[in-house]
Image (spheres, rainbow, N blue to C red):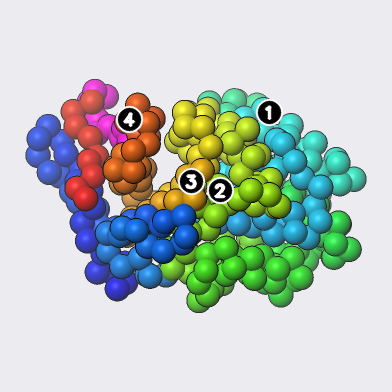
Amino acid sequence: MSLLEAPVVAHVVRASFVESVHRGLAVVTAPDGTVERAWGDPNTPVLPRSSLKPLQAVAMLRAGAALAGEALALACASHSGEDAHLAGVRAALAASGLDEEALRNTPDRPIGEDALAAWLASGRGKERVAQNCSGKHAGMLAACLAAGWDTATYLDSQHPLQRLITDVVAELAGSPVVATVTDGCGAPVHAFELAGLARALGRIASAPSGPEARVAAAMVSHPWFVGGTNRPDSVLMADVPGVIAKEGADAVLAVGLPDGRGVAVKIADGARAARVVGAAVLGMLGVDPDAVARLGDVPVLGHGERVGSVVAVL
């Protein structure tokens, strides 16, 4: 199955009228990695986009990067660009003896609404440190320095770090990488089956030791640094102990539960329903109802007032 054949998984409802529908895929993997339940074909290859970051962070640690705490959470982050995020990225770079000039990600402005407003008011333009993936890039640089690899070419798909990331992705996902392309920030991003993304997050969340456990601990302990104020993945991790969660661009959501189960969602049209469908699946798994309700609340507005919502139809 391709995304073109994905089933309808959500409706956009405006005042009881179904305005539009979203097709997509969702999967739950068991602690042993097998597919427990799926909507659509869970073997469909997808691009995880930023949902890949926890896997990339595992590879950074395996390369020897001395990342922990907030710096490691930022390596997994699509941060909003709030002041503490930027300070954390700068501190991570400084710990490696580097500054912002070493970053090779795409310059941009903060993605958080308040952070962006403050940035624009200050008259600043696009900068690498403000781009939401700057923490990941700081982590990649730390890994290169620890392993003795070149830092100027770390985004090349054939760089030793990127080859290691490819191997780690295939290992954690339990499925082969079928394509490698360039992500929005300039780093390679890998396509593999959706079930593999769920499987990998479950393995990281439940790991008893090693780099996987260190990544999970950083995300669980510092959820705000993974996203920011009112960001869905940060809020879910703050609400539900032991859960790790990461959104990805173009409507991807991946969640790992501390018991080893994993959930992954991809909406075919890249629109807003991923968190709604993810919340519905997590509700079926018995995750805290209040946390699920917050995650899945995507209102439809009319004249600035709520007149409907996006609803899952699994």
Residue 156 appears at what percent x and percent y? 71, 69
Asked if the residue at tag 2 contacts the one at tag 1, i.e. Cβ–Cβ closer than 8 Å, the answer is: no
Q: State the SS at label 4.
A: helix
* Amino acid, disc 4: Pro
* Amino acid, disc 3: Asp
Cα distance in 3D space between marks 3 and 1? 31 Å
Asked if the residue at tag 2 contacts the one at tag 3, i.e. Cβ–Cβ closer than 8 Å, the answer is: yes
Asked if the residue at tag 1 contacts the one at tag 4, i.e. Cβ–Cβ closer than 8 Å, the answer is: no
Cα distance in 3D space between marks 3 and 2? 6 Å
Q: Which residue does the numbered mark 3 point to in the structure image?
A: 259
Question: In terms of depth relative to the viewer, which is nearer, 182 or 196?
Answer: 196
Write the residue at 47% across / 28% down. Answer: 239
Given this view, does label 3 or label 4 mark the residue nearer the observer? Answer: 3
Mark sitting earlier along the chain (1/2): 1
Q: Is residue 183 magenta?
A: no
Residue 185, label in figure:
none
Q: In which quarter of the image is the N terminus?
A: bottom left
Mark sitting earlier along the chain (4/2): 2
Residue 84, label in figure:
1
Number of residues whose C-alpha sits closer than 10 Å to that of mark 1, classed few (under 14), some (14–19) or many (20 or more): some
Cα distance in 3D space between marks 4 and 1? 30 Å
Q: Which residue does the numbered mark 4 point to in the structure image?
A: 289
Q: Which residue does the numbered mark 2 point to in the structure image?
A: 206
Picture quadrant of residue 264: bottom left
32, above or below 242, in the image: below
Mark sitting earlier along the chain (3/2): 2
72, above or below 56, in the image: above
Q: State the SS at label 2.
A: helix
76, above or below 305, in the image: below
